[in-house]
Image (tube, rainbow, N blue to C red):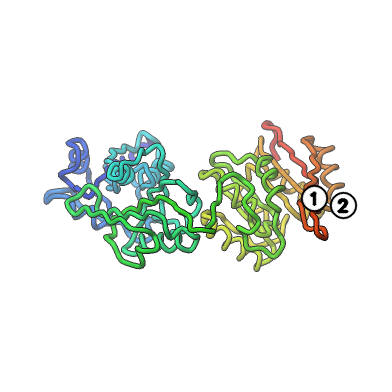
């Protein structure tokens, strides 16, 4: 802990307010020099509490101020469990543990599972507090139980619209308001029957996903149907995509560059496979980049970053990647070298080519950097007169190269 730096105590508080806090949580609030929280949370405190300051909008400058504050103790109020999609996790990422204390409360997630009789270990939590409602789309698989953190009086309605737009209108849809407090209310219906009604701003939504007949049934295993994407033809086909994602091997927290993203399928399925991973889709055509954004929203990965520009020039300003995919343009002067140089030590590059010229570039890369070359040949059964025959795709040559852990630059 730096000399004179303020100590931050994060206290989780529920809809049950002051009465629901432990003795330790109450002591932490009363001992603080200042209490920061939402207006709703601050109103739950009794008379005689320390000076109170509501969070401003946007929140980020206030967080910066807390992190850099000198002297004293600040108590930050958070909803439920501060480390479960809460401000506690935000502060923990920026503060030394000697400056931060977190006192948790029971989470809305736990309360929702308890009210519905759902084993919490078998339920997925999705937050749409910050991310758009489309973030829930990644979790929409038949039989999946989901608890969604929502915000605003129209939060549940926005989530219902996402389900209905993706063929899940028949899904069980339970809105849980003011969980754990005296005003608790639970409304059970279906996504399509919920409509556009407003609810209490403090609510969560529980979903049991049921696809309509003909509705999408998208697995998180890489290789979504090509029809899942809007595309002008610049799309890595599903069979090659599945092999490519297996080669890229998404890992927790890892950053992918999808260079020449086309329809964005590689970056999107990288994020679908590993929820903590990050990805940047780089595309020189503005119309394709807009299509990438639409596909990312549709398939539940709104966190996908997009960069408009031509590689390799545009790459210099980006954060160093843990993995790079090049699906087109491998013959562009300096592209492979720039991507290899940008990779973090221990990072991986996967590049696909369908032309002889591209194959020559990848063969040379294999000779210089090592790794492995694979030739993928896929054929599909297609009508042939009154019979069916094999219709081959263009062969794809794939190079996978791993940068040595000790190598830099």
Image-quadrant location for residue 54: bottom left
- Residue denoted by label 1: 353
326 or 212, nearer to the observer = 212
Q: Is residue 4 above or below residue 185?
A: above
Q: For this view, does 300 lie left or right of residue 374?
A: left
Point out the residue furthest to the top here. Answer: 406
For this view, does 238 lie left or right of residue 279? right
Q: Nearer the viewer, residue 175 or 336?
A: 175
Q: Position of residue 214 (x, y in %)?
A: 54, 59
* Relative height, residue 297 to residue 369 (above, below): below
Query: Does any portion of residue 74 appear in the rendered image?
Result: no
Q: Residue furthest front?
A: 386
Q: Which residue is mark 2?
A: 357
- Specify the label residue 35 is tagged with: none
Look at the numbered discs 1 and 2 and tell me whether their residues touch, using CB distance below 8 Å: yes
Name the spot of residue 322 as percent of width and height, x first: 63, 42
Q: Secondary structure at mark 2?
A: helix
Q: Residue at x 45, y 53 (%)?
A: 210
Residue at x 79%, y 54% (from the top left corner): 388
Q: How many other residues sit within 10 Å of disc 2, few (<14), some (14-19) or many (≥20)? A: few
For the N terminus, the image quarter is top left
Viewer can see residue 259: yes
- Which corner quadrant of the image does residue 61 belong to? bottom left
């Amino acid at each position: 802990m730096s000399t004179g730096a303020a100590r931050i105590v994060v206290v989780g508080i529920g809809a049950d307010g002051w009465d629901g806090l432990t003795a330790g949580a109450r002591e932490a609030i009363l001992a603080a020099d200042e209490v920061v929280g939402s207006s709703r949370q601050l109103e739950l405190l009794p008379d005689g509490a320390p000076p109170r300051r509501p969070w401003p909008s946007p929140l980020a400058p206030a967080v910066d101020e807390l992190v850099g504050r000198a002297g004293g103790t600040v108590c930050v109020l958070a909803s439920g469990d501060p480390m479960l999609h809460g401000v506690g996790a935000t502060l923990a990422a920026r503060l030394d543990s000697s400056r931060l204390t977190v006192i948790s409360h029971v989470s809305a997630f736990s309360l929702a599972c308890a009210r519905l009789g759902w084993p919490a270990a078998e339920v997925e939590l999705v937050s749409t507090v910050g991310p758009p409602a489309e973030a829930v789309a990644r979790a929409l698989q038949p039989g999946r139980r989901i608890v969604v953190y929502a915000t605003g009086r129209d939060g549940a309605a926005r989530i219902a619209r996402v389900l209905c737009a993706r063929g899940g209108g028949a899904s069980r849809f339970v809105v849980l308001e003011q969980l754990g407090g005296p005003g608790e209310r639970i409304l059970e219906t279906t996504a399509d029957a919920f409509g556009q009604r407003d609810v209490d701003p403090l609510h969560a939504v529980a979903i049991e996903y049921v696809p309509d007949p003909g509705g999408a049934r998208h697995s998180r295993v890489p290789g979504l149907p090509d029809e899942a994407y809007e595309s002008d033809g610049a799309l890595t086909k599903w069979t090659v995509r599945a092999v490519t994602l297996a080669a890229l091997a998404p890992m927790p927290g890892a950053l992918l560059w999808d260079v020449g993203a086309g329809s964005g399928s590689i970056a999107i399925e990288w994020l679908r496979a590993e929820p903590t991973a990050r990805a940047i889709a780089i595309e020189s055509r503005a119309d394709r980049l807009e299509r990438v954004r639409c596909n990312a929203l549709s398939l539940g990965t709104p966190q996908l970053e997009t960069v408009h520009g031509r590689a390799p020039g545009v790459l210099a300003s980006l954060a160093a990647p843990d993995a790079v995919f090049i699906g087109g343009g491998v013959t562009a002067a300096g592209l492979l070298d720039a991507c290899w140089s940008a990779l973090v030590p221990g990072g991986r590059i996967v590049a696909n080519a369908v032309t002889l010229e591209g194959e020559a570039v990848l063969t040379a890369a294999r000779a210089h950097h090592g790794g492995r070359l694979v030739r993928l040949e896929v054929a599909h059964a297609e009508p042939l007169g009154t019979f069916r025959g094999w219709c081959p795709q263009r062969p794809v040559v794939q190079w996978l190269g791993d940068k040595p852990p000790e190598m830099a630059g």
